[in-house]
Structure formats: C-alpha cells, structure tokens
Image: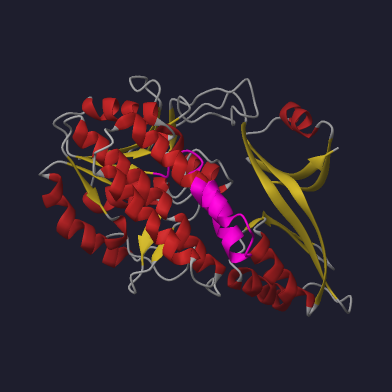
Amino acid sequence: MLVFKFGGASVKDASGIINLANIVKKYDGQQLLIVVSAMGKTTNALEKLTKAYVERQGDVQVIFDDIKKYHFAILEQLFEASDPIFDEVANTFVEIDWIIEDEPHDDYDFTYDQIVSIGEMVSTHIVNAYLNKTGIKSQWLDVRGYVQTDNTYREGKVQWDKTRAAISKAIPAILEKGILVTQGFLGGTSENFTTTLGREGSDYTASIFAACLEAESVTTWKDVPGILNADPKFFSDTVKFDQLSYTEAIEMTYYGATVIHPKTIKPLQNARIPLYVKSFTDPDASGTIIKADVVTAFTKPVVILKQNQALLSISAKDYSFISENHLSYIFGLFAQNQVKVNVMQTSALSFTVCFDLYEERFNKLLQGLSQDFKVKYNYNLTLITVRHHTPASLKELTANKTVLLEQVSRNTVQLVVNAG
C-alpha cells in the first residue's frame, strides 16, 4: 500500500491535474491513498480573505469571487458543463458564504481554520472527479473524520489513539475497492469543527495515514527534483541529495526547510517507512529517499532561509538579571500565544528570541510582555541556518547584510540578518 502527496504547485492548473492522473496510472494495481493540497496559491488567497473578513474590509466579496473564478476556470478546461462537479464545487464554496454572512468569531484562529480549509475540500473534489472521468476508480474521503485533533486551531495536535483507531478500522476495506483521495493539512475535533495542522501540513497528513496503515512508502511530489541543499528560488548552484537519514531530514525541517513539513518525518521514522521526494514533472527520475541507516557526504553546506522573522529583546524593568523564573514566565506567554521560538539567546540582562511573525499573535504576546518587561523588537528579518558550514560559505551568505544575532554549534550556524 502506497501513500502519495501532491502539493499545491502540482495541481495549480488543469495540466497539473492531468499530469497527476498520468502519474497515478503508472501505479495501476497498487493500493493507493492520495493526499492533495489546495490548488496553487489558494491557501494564501483564503488567508487574505480571512483577514479581510475579520477586519471588515470592503473587498471580502471581491477576493472570494476571484478564488471561485480561478477554480471554475480550471473546471471548464477539464469537464463538460453538465458535469456534476460544478455543483459539487459551488456547494463547497457555499460554506464560506455562510461564514462571511455572520459576525466574525472572537477567535481569529478558529475562523481561519473554518475558511482556509475549504481550499483542500475543493481541490480534492476536483481531483477525485477527474480521476473517475479518466477511468481511474477513486473515492473521495473527508479527512476530518479520521485525523482527530485537539482544539488548537491553526496548529491542531493529533490525537494519535483516536486517529489510529479510526483509520485502521475503516480505510483498509475502502482501499480494497479503489484509490482514495483525501485532504492534506486538515483535521477534525470531537465537536466536528475543522482544524489545520500548520502551514504546508499536507506532508504530515500523508505520514499520519502511512504510519496508521503500515504503508510500504510515502511519496511527496514536488516542483523540484528532490531535496536540495538550498532553495533554488534563491540559490542557483544547488545540489540534490540522493538519500538522507531520518535524523538529517528532521534537522533540516526543524530549521525551516520548506520541502517537507517538520512533523512529517517522526511518524515515518517510528514505523521505518521510507519517504520519497520526487518531481511531478519528471516522475521516473529517482528523486531523494529518506530512510534509516544512511550516511550522506555533504559536498556543499545545507542553507535554509526563513523570512518574515521578528527579533525580540526582553529585559526586566528593574535591571535585574534574567533568571529562571523570568524565563519560565516568558516561555509561558510564548506558549499561550502559540509563538514558536526559532533561535534564543540569553545574556545577564536580556533574553533575545527570533520567531516567525504572525501579526495577531505577536501583538498579543507584546501586550503580555510589556506589563512586566522592557521590550525592543525588529521585524522583516531573515533567519539563515547553515548546516555543515564552512568559513567561505558564511562569508558569502552574510555579504552586504547586517547580522543582528549569531549562534554557532558543532554542525549548525544560525544568523538573523537584515539587508545591509
């Protein structure tokens, strides 16, 4: 039994969906569960819609209409006008109509999950319908009935016992009848509300199903030939890894490598299930395999960029030392506001942290900290993480940049920078 994951770039247009079907045909006769992300940049557009709705901006309907037009334009290229998929997609979008007709919920993250999740619901309906149209027997599955999470919206924590029981009880029998198409990124609560698992969480969904079903392997289909030492959008001289260990892959994703969601690897490592990262434009190429007991020779450093970073320095108002009690309280505020620390550094009088900037969470965190501490911050920064670094690589990466924070360990250097 195989698990495939197709990201937004692979289904961004009609030709992408046709290509997906052609890849699936190569695995005729295999039991196959397919996890699909929202199409193209739909998640970004739905995030923009959510923000406009909550802030009562005047362009809510315009944004929503553009999202619908994008999807229906793709439908028109794939299906006859009489195909029931048009009504199916329209009815799915109605769920957003119902939400934006009412006053916004007090919890922004709750609202976010209910709206943004519609991207995956729509994309999987389209993919499933197209597979069946081309003679590939498949069934649509609502992931929210199987991946069970707590009520941590935008970062749902998987309740593994419930999830494993639901998946192992029902899914094997369904797979006997044909291919399954389901949503990545999403989960469901005991109250039947939708949660999301964190941005780019479709990879994680694939690993959850694989672990629960004891799959032979997981393949995530990307717009790159495999895992590279750096993002080709920013670096021209990248090299591909043919294989990586689970440990190295975990390190890379933890520091922000976006080719795989950070939580993806651990369930696969526990079950010793290999993960293939392959190109959807060259499906017969080898890609990268992640598995146990692999030793990789790093001929070039691994470089990971995280943009939209904030750097926050916290000090006591009475100029006292930053103690363990201070740190305990500060970390409590970070946890309470769901702000994840990427780098931290402590001195006698201050505690400095770098983290992904989410405006709503940052403002709440700042409000809580300002009651007891002096706070200084910078934003629009970049975090550069370099594994297996050399002096020459660090010099090149920091050229014409101001380094605001530097942290060095045996295998890894982290630099918070802005453009010089």
Q: Is residue 35 above or below residue 27?
A: below
Extreme residue toward the front, this view:
82
Q: Position of residue 286 (x, y in %)?
A: 37, 22
Q: Position of residue 300 (x, y in %)?
A: 61, 25
Q: Position of residue 38 (x, y in %)?
A: 42, 45
388 relative position to 110: left or right: right
| Quadrant into which the C terminus falls | top right
Residue 396 inside the magenta-drawn segment: no
Q: Is residue 184 above or below residue 30?
A: below
Q: Residue at x 31, y 41 (%)?
A: 126
Residue 124 picture quarter: top left
State whether residue 220 appears in this view.
no
| Quadrant into which the N terminus falls | top left
Q: Is residue 288 above or below residue 306?
A: above
Q: Residue at x 36, y 44 (%)?
A: 123
Residue 62 inside the magenta-drawn segment: yes
Q: Which residues are magenta?
A: 37-65
Magenta stretch prevailing secondary structure? helix
Q: Residue at x 50, y 24 (%)?
A: 240
Instruction: Choose between 413 and 360: the one closer to the eye.
Output: 360
Q: Residue at x 13, y 31 (%)?
A: 29
111 relative position to 23: left or right: right
Residue 383 picture quarter: top right
State whether residue 102 appears in this view.
yes
Instruction: Choose between 333 and 73: the one closer to the eye.
Output: 73
Q: Position of residue 255 (x, y in %)?
A: 59, 46
